[in-house]
Image (cartoon, rainbow, N blue to C red):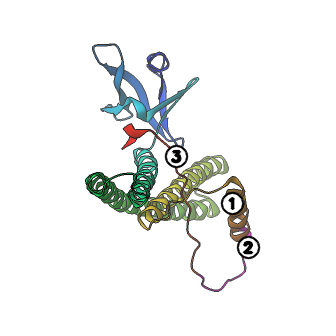
Amino acid sequence: MTQNSNLFLSVGKQVKDEYERIIGKVASFAVNPNGRIDSVYIEQGDGRFIKHPKESLKVEGSEVTLLSKTKMETTTLCDQIPLIWRKDQALKELVEKKKISPEVYEDIHNSFEGVLNQLKSGAQALIEKINKETARCAQEIKELNYALVHLEIEHEIGKVDEQSYQTAFSTIQECLKRANVEKSDLEAMKNKLSNILLGETQPQTEQETEEETMEESAQEASTLPSPSLPEPPVVVYVKEVGESGI
């Protein structure tokens, strides 16, 4: 969580999203009676003011970043769903070992199950939202590629001079890079949530992570056709939190 002092120093500073797109600048704050910042007001490029939760802003030196709400929600669900599931499994083991009574087990199990179903419902809704955002990115990438082709044509026939062409080319390439990175992030978030809902909740060792990363890199580098095989499950990291995380 960003400290109040850092946020107060960010007034007037430019705000970008995680993909280096300029959002606007920090204009003001909503401060509660005990002096803690609850929200941050950002003036957008069109002059509108949008209020964001304090937790959605990250301040590092002179850089102010607006964190992705979708990414934050994904992280929360990917932490909480496996945690509740593991607690319910531990509860089941306790009743099997006769350390708690069946009545207590049923009561707490029903509570866990209710929370888990609610979280899973939220994950499913978030997947639908991610699908829409992914489609938006795909459309943006398509339009940028068309823009690049038309720029090349106009440059080729001499209607766009070299300096203007280089400037426009660089701008489109940067936009393409950002859109592709965002689309990849969205697809990764969807995979995590999908595997959570399928019950892929076991933590992964550092060695397994490194081996998986090397294997994925090798697959991406390869241009040879391969037979259609089922994709390996994506294993989700589980971050331990306290009881208040339920």
Q: Which of pointers 3 and 1 lies earlier in the amino acid sequence? A: 1
Q: What separation in Å lies between label 3 and label 1 (alpha carbons)?
A: 17 Å
What amino acid type should be assigned to the residue bearing mark 2? Ser
Of badges 2 and 3, nearer the viewer stands 3
Asked if residue 21 is positioned above or below residue 182 in the image, the reply reads above
Q: Which residue sits furthest front?
A: 98
- Residue sitting at x 41%, y 25%: 26
User: Which secondary structure, mark 2?
Assistant: loop
Residue 134: mark: none
Residue 239: mark: 3
Mark 2–mark 1 contact, CB under 8 Å? no
Q: Which of pointers 2 and 3 lies earlier in the amino acid sequence? A: 2
User: Which secondary structure, mark 3?
Assistant: loop
- Residue sitting at x 55%, y 69%: 233
Q: Which of pointers 2 and 1 lies earlier in the amino acid sequence? A: 1
Residue 222: mark: 2
Q: Position of residue 216 (x, y in %)?
A: 68, 66
- Residue sitting at x 47%, y 65%: 195
Label 2, residues with CA under 10 Å away: few <14, some 14-19, many ≥20: few
Q: Which is nearer the eye, 2 or 22?
A: 2
User: Which secondary structure, mark 1?
Assistant: helix
Q: What separation in Å lies between label 2 and label 3 (alpha carbons)?
A: 34 Å
Of badges 2 and 1, nearer the viewer stands 1
Q: Position of residue 186 (x, y in %)?
A: 48, 57
Q: Which residue is mark 1?
A: 208
What amino acid type should be assigned to the residue bearing mark 3? Lys
What amino acid type should be assigned to the residue bearing mark 1? Glu
